C-alpha cells in the first residue's frame, strides 16, 4: 500500500532563491495548474512561477503551501492555506488540487484533513475554498447544484463538488469566468463608451496609470480595496471587513512589482468631491502571448447608477490595446448574481468560458 505524506514548503523569497526551494515551488504550481486545467480545460488560466510567487508574499497574509508526496517522493497533490496574521482574524481560504494521474486514491482527503487541522489550530472559524468547474451550456433541470444565492450552477457530478459536499462544506456562490478576445470590435467599444460618458456626465472622469498608485490617490484606493470586502457580492458568506491603509497598499504594490507583468489601474474620480468613486485593475504579462487578467473591479455603492462600470471597463480595454498590443485576450471573473457587472462585460464582448463554485464551512 502506498503511503502519502504531507509536507509544507519553505516558500522561496524570489525565483533566484536556493534551487531546492525554487524547484519545490515549481512542482507545487505545476501540480496545482494541472489539477485545475483538467477540469476547466482553459490553458490561459495557467500561471508562470515568476508571476505567481509574489502573490504568495502578500504583506500580512503570506501563503502557506503544501504538497503530498507518495513513496517515491513524487508530488501528487498541491494545497494552500491563506489567512491574515493579525489578531482576531476568523476567516481563511484553502485550496486542494490532486494531480489528474493520481486521483481517486484518497490523496485529496489526506491533504484536506491536514489543511483543516491547520485552520483549527489557527483558530479560524470561517473556511472558504474555490472549486473550478467545466462550462456546459445553460444550467437547467436535474444534475446541477444551485448555490444559496440562486444564481448560477455547477454540475453536481463533478469530483470537486462531490468531495466538498461529502466533507460538510456548503455551496454558497458561483463565479463566472469570462473571456474577451483581443483585438476588440471598435464600433462596439465606441458605442459602449459613448453611452457611459453620457450617463456619467461631467461629474466623473477617468484616470489611468501603470505601476504604483500616485500619492494623490493612495488613501482613496486603499478605501476602494477595503470596500471590496464589504461591497462586492458575497452571497450569505460575507467575511469580516478587510481594512486597507496607504502603507499596506504600497507594500502590496511593491511585492507585485517583482512579477514579469505591468499592473494597470483605471480609476474614476467624482469631480465634485475630488475622490475616487471606482476602480479596476488589470495584470498585463510581459509575454505578449499570455492573457491579461482583470482583477478587482468596484464602483462604490453611493456612486452606482451612472454606468461607471462601463466607463472603467472601456478605458481599461483601450489602454491595454494601445499600450500592450498583441495580447490574445482579457480574462475576468464575476459573481453570477452581479448582473450589473455581467451586463457591462457582455456589452463589450466578454463570453463565458467557465465557472468556479465558492464553498464555505463554519466551525
Image: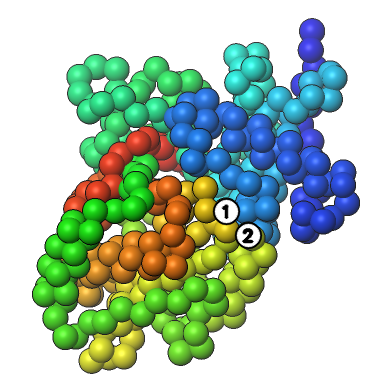
The percent coordinates of residue 134 (x first, y second) are: 39, 28
Q: Is residue 151 above or below residue 166?
A: below
Taking the image as shown, residue 64 lies to the left or right of residue 138, namely: right
Q: Tell me which label, 1 or 2, sits earlier in the chain.
A: 2
Please tell me which residue lies in front, 134 or 147: 134
Quick one: SS at disc 2?
loop
Please tell me which residue lies in front, 359 or 215: 215
The percent coordinates of residue 234 (x first, y second) are: 35, 51
Mark sitting on residue 287: 1
Residue at the (64%, 17%) spot, across then down: 101
* Crowd tier of the residue under label 1, counting other residues whose Cα lies within 10 Å: few below 14, some 14–19, many 20 or above: few
Please tell me which residue lies in front, 74 or 173: 74
The percent coordinates of residue 20 (x first, y second) are: 87, 43
Name the front one of labels 1 and 2.
1
Taking the image as shown, residue 235 lies to the left or right of residue 125, namely: left
Quadrant of image for the N terminus: top right
The percent coordinates of residue 166 (x first, y second) are: 48, 22
Q: Is residue 89 above or below residue 339?
A: below
The answer to whether mark 1 and mark 2 are in CB contact below 8 A is: yes
Quick one: SS at disc 1?
loop
Residue at the (34%, 29%) spot, across then down: 135
Residue at the (62%, 53%) spot, across then down: 51
Amino acid at each position: 500500500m502506498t503511503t502519502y505524506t504531507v509536507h509544507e514548503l519553505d516558500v522561496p523569497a524570489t525565483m533566484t532563491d536556493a534551487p531546492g526551494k525554487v524547484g519545490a515551488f515549481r512542482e507545487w504550481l505545476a501540480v496545482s495548474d494541472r489539477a485545475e486545467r483538467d477540469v476547466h480545460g482553459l490553458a490561459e488560466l495557467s500561471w508562470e512561477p515568476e508571476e505567481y510567487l509574489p502573490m504568495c508574499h502578500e504583506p500580512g497574509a503570506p501563503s502557506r503551501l503544501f504538497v503530498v508526496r507518495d513513496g517515491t517522493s513524487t508530488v501528487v497533490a498541491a494545497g494552500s492555506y491563506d489567512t491574515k496574521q493579525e489578531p482576531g482574524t476568523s476567516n481563511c481560504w484553502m485550496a486542494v488540487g490532486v494531480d489528474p494521474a493520481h486521483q481517486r486514491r484518497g490523496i485529496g482527503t489526506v491533504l484536506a484533513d491536514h489543511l483543516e487541522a491547520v485552520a483549527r489550530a489557527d483558530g479560524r472559524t470561517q473556511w472558504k475554498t474555490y472549486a473550478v468547474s467545466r462550462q456546459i451550456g445553460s444550467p437547467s433541470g436535474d444534475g446541477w447544484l444551485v448555490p444559496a444565492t440562486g444564481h448560477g450552477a455547477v454540475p453536481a457530478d463533478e469530483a470537486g463538488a462531490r468531495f466538498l459536499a461529502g466533507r460538510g462544506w456548503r455551496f454558497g456562490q458561483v463565479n463566472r469566468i469570462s473571456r474577451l478576445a483581443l483585438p476588440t470590435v471598435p464600433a462596439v467599444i465606441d458605442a459602449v463608451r459613448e453611452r457611459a460618458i453620457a450617463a456619467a456626465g461631467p461629474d466623473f472622469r477617468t484616470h489611468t496609470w501603470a505601476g504604483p498608485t500616485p500619492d494623490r490617490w493612495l488613501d482613496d484606493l486603499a478605501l476602494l480595496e477595503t470596500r471590496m470586502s464589504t461591497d462586492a457580492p458575497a452571497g450569505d458568506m460575507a467575511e469580516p471587513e478587510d481594512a486597507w491603509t496607504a502603507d499596506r497598499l504600497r507594500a502590496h504594490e511593491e511585492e507585485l512589482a517583482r512579477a514579469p507583468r505591468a499592473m494597470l489601474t483605471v480609476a474614476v474620480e467624482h469631480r465634485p468631491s475630488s475622490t475616487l468613486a471606482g476602480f479596476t485593475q488589470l495584470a498585463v504579462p510581459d509575454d505578449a502571448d499570455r492573457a491579461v487578467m482583470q482583477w478587482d473591479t468596484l464602483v462604490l455603492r453611493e456612486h452606482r447608477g451612472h454606468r461607471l462600470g462601463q466607463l472603467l471597463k472601456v478605458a481599461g480595454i483601450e489602454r491595454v490595446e494601445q499600450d500592450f498590443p498583441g495580447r490574445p485576450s482579457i480574462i475576468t471573473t464575476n459573481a453570477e448574481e452581479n448582473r450589473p457587472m455581467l451586463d457591462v462585460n457582455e456589452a463589450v464582448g466578454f463570453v463565458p468560458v467557465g465557472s468556479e463554485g465558492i464553498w464555505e464551512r463554519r466551525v
